[in-house]
Amino acid sequence: MIKKIEHIGIASKNIDESLTVFDKLLGRSTYKTEKVASEGVKTHFYKVGESKIELLEATSEKSPISNFISKKGEGMHHLALYVDNIYTELERLNSLGFEAIGEVKKGADNKLICFLHPKTTSGVLIELCQEQFE
Ligand code: ZN
């Protein structure tokens, strides 16, 4: 079941500038920075109530974030929905015609994640995420 908006991901072209902007905008600093090597990104998280804002910085030219920025420019990249069971939820969504991009994998912030293709979600890249219990 989908529980809440976990975070909103924002692609940043210049992370130092974006951090300065969001520190000012939100009146706080990030509480966590984490590299996700498999995705070629470094993530910077702000807590905003029950949700988070994730600034995404590309760490390589081949990063999906580099691709996104070269096509669409910086800005909103994805909407992450928190689910209690990512496998059950993916099965439900697949049966309704939504298309997953790849398999469930380990993402930032100790989460299992999977993306849904924007062509099946009104143009919005959706990330499903679930807490990963060791
Ligand atoms: Zn995310």
Image (cartoon, rainbow, N blue to C red):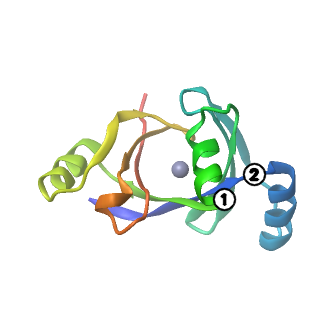
Q: Are marks 1 and 2 in contact (CB under 8 Å)?
A: yes
Under mark 1, the amino acid is Gly
In the image, 44: left or right of 89? right
Q: Position of residue 96 (x, y in %)?
A: 14, 59
Which one is in front, 58 or 130?
58
Which residue matches tag 2?
A: 13
Which one is in front, 112 or 13?
13
Query: For the point 58% across and 50% down, which residue is it?
Result: 68
Q: Position of residue 32 (x, y in %)?
A: 71, 45
Under mark 2, the amino acid is Lys
Q: Is residue 49 above or below residue 44?
A: below
Query: For the point 66% across and 59% down, which residue is it?
Result: 73
**Position of the C terminus by quadrant:** top left
Q: CA distance from mark 1 to mark 2?
A: 8 Å
Query: For the point 60% across and 59% down, which residue is it?
Result: 72
Q: Which mark is residue 73?
A: 1
Element marked by disc 2: loop
Which one is in front, 32 or 107?
107
